[in-house]
Image (cartoon, rainbow, N blue to C red):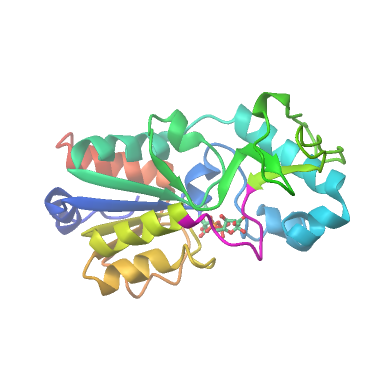
Amino acid sequence: MPLIETSLIRALQEARHVVVLTGAGVSAESGVPTFREAQTGLWARYDPDRLATPAAFADDPALVWGWYAWRRKLVRQAMPNPAHVAIRRLAELVPRLTLITQNVDDLHERAGHDSVIHLHGSLMDSRCSVCEAGHEASAEVLLAEPGPVEPPRCRLCAAPVRPGVVWFGEALPAQELAQAFAAAQRCELVLSVGTSGQVYPAAAIPLVAARAGARLVQINPAPTPLDDLAEHSLRGAAGIVLPELLDRLEGLN
Ligand code: OAD
């Protein structure tokens, strides 16, 4: 367990607006794989060029749809872990908390957050790849292993339905992006949890906040590009460090 300094507890007690930015690491202890970790990350085992770009979907929609059907099943089976629960506790304690996630799972929502800014979309949503009409999520298949599955067809224009996630080369949803950067400009503290900080524009959120005067705190077992900038870098698993941090904040130990 990394040392949680009293100055960090004080900074959290004083902050009137906290931004929590999460990445795949916050869901790792729920059994949802991260992307860039050497052995276990999705991008170590699967090629993003074949699975996570508009061109990949155009080339082989069944391969892409089946891969997301597998990831959807992983997430449906997963449960929020103590890190998700601790972030929910934090939201009760600070005057204002904006939760921004790069994750496409719904584990923050299932831990009790009703307003999560999803910068990279959601695995649970899907829409027409041409006319963008929404598609009924309950109709989606779930797969125990990745494998080709023909995507359903749009009820309006019959084009293939695609997952509601942001792929490489695509713009992030404009409203979510604007809300996230507005919060970054105004907040007093950013808590960055479980992200490698390599994917922009999400990775710019702590940088923009720091430039506007916010304090930076991060929780990650591995080094990240924020190490030099963060006032506190807690090197450990979010599911262990965050509950301890919240206990300290609530005066429980
Ligand atoms: P990455 O896979 O790049 O990074 C995950 C981070 O979580 C790493 O820095 C790990 O050290 C850290 N980590 C692992 N286990 C942890 C734990 N138990 N507690 C805390 N941290 C832990 O995932 P992201 O930074 O989320 O985009 O990746 C950003 C984006 O890249 C994703 O949203 C996805 C991907 O390509 C799209 O799909 C558009």
168 inside magenta stretch: yes
Left or right of 31? Residue 234 is: left
Quadrant into which the C terminus falls = top left
Along the viewing direction, whichever of 223 and 89 lies nearer the viewer: 89
Q: Position of residue 156 (x, y in %)?
A: 75, 35
Q: Look at the image and tell me whether residue 230 can be seen.
A: no
Q: Position of residue 190 (x, y in %)?
A: 30, 58
Range of the magenta residues? 165-174
Position of residue 193 relative to residue 251, above or below, is below
Number of labels in the image equals: 0
Position of residue 191 relative to residue 126, above or below, is below
Ligand 1 quadrant? Answer: bottom right
Position of residue 74 relative to residue 36, above or below, is above
Q: Residue at x 46, y 68 (%)?
A: 224
Q: Position of residue 118 (x, y in %)?
A: 48, 47
Q: Which residue is farthest front?
A: 156
Q: Magenta stretch: dominant SS?
A: loop
